[in-house]
Amino acid sequence: MIATAIAHPNIAFIKYWGNRDARLRLPLTGSFSMTLAGLETRTRVQFDADFPVDRFALNGEEQQNESLARVSGFLDRVRELAGISLFARVESGNNFPTGAGVASSASAFAALALAASSAAGLEMTEPALSALARRGSGSACRSVPGGFAEWLPGSSDADSYAVQVAPPEYWDLVDLIVILHSGHKAIGSTEGHALAGTSPLNALRVAGAPERLIECRQALLGRDFERLARVVEADSHWMHAVMRTSSPPLFYWTPDTETVLWHVLTWRKQGRALCATVDAGPNVHVITTGAEKDWAEARLRALPGVLDVLTAKPGGGAKIVRI
Ligand code: DP6
């Protein structure tokens, strides 16, 4: 009972922030993302009658406490679905920095959902697999289908999952991930989601999300960069406005984050196809087109505080691999 799967992280164009059911990870709003090729999590799961407990190693390091508990809790859900009671050994590795504003929990739980369900003998449809991944980390449901994906908030555990809106090759967008800080973030997303409801701006953000989702979907399907840029930036700012006005407030940006955002906006005003979005960390995801990539990357690398720029094109969905 062994399986190995890979999955890519994703960058949200329309963000997931806040749950209406935190245990089931049923979100307050729908969200929309691009899966990121090149960055990947590879996870191997083995269930075995001889294992006395679940074990989890990440990038070769044996995990304990919350990290192990989160994986083990997720495996409980897989065991429940498969009707088995075996413990598992999970070995997972990322080829990109963990916890650095590249949502590693998305690729982690998408890969884990696929590897664990296959190892347990479950044959799942893509929506069921996406809903399962969501239970581990909300954004993980969007890393199951690949390409450009929309998470339909749904009304229950079974119908809250992501679907592909367009395949990876639909539009040659590029995410230039501007790394300003590569350590772990101070407040993780799970804790942050729980604070969303304390912001007086939360209700406004939630009320406007359906319209922004339609706008984003239409901009993507029409390959209209300027339209996409406006809604992607607006949605990111809405989320950070909620974060900053929560109790306690959450500030993820550094002065260097602000500098990158300012330059991206300025270059767009000068006619360049660029926009920026920021997750729960200081790093900036600059969305651009294949044609603008080299120009933009060279300029971003010259800005203060920029440690590195990772490049990601739209990627495929979670998949089983042989080794
Ligand atoms: C800011 O999916 O990481 O990246 O469900 O608690 O694991 P958990 O949260 P997570 O939240 C992602 C938040 C975000 C926006 C997004 O990706 O939509």
Image (cartoon, rainbow, N blue to C red):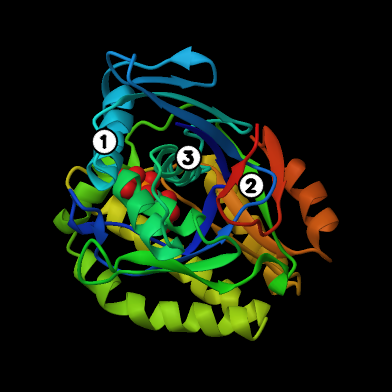
Earlier sequence position, callout 2 versus callout 1? 1
Where in the figure is residue 104, as x and y percent of width and height? 49, 39
Query: Circle 1 — which element?
Result: loop
Q: Quadrant of the N terminus?
A: top left
**What type is the residue that disc 2 sits on?**
Ile
| Residue 7 in sight from this viewpoint | yes
Disc 3 marks which residue? 115
Alpha-carbon neighbours of circle 1 within 10 Å: few (<14), some, or many (≥20)? Answer: few
- Identify the residue shown where x is 34% and y is 75%: 209
- Identify the residue shown where x is 37% and y is 56%: 240
Earlier sequence position, callout 1 versus callout 3? 1
What is the CA distance from the residue labelled 2 to the residue labelled 1?
41 Å
Mark nearer the viewer, 2 or 1: 1
Query: Circle 3 — which element?
Result: helix
Where in the figure is residue 250, as x and y percent of width and height? 30, 44
Where in the figure is residue 21, as x and y percent of width and height? 16, 56
Disc 2 marks which residue? 177
**What type is the residue that disc 1 sits on?**
Ile
Q: Quadrant of residue 281?
A: top left
Disc 1 marks which residue? 84
Contact flag, marks 1 and 3 (Cβ < 8 Å)? no
Q: Say how many tags the image has.
A: 3
Q: Nearer the viewer, residue 273 or 84?
A: 84
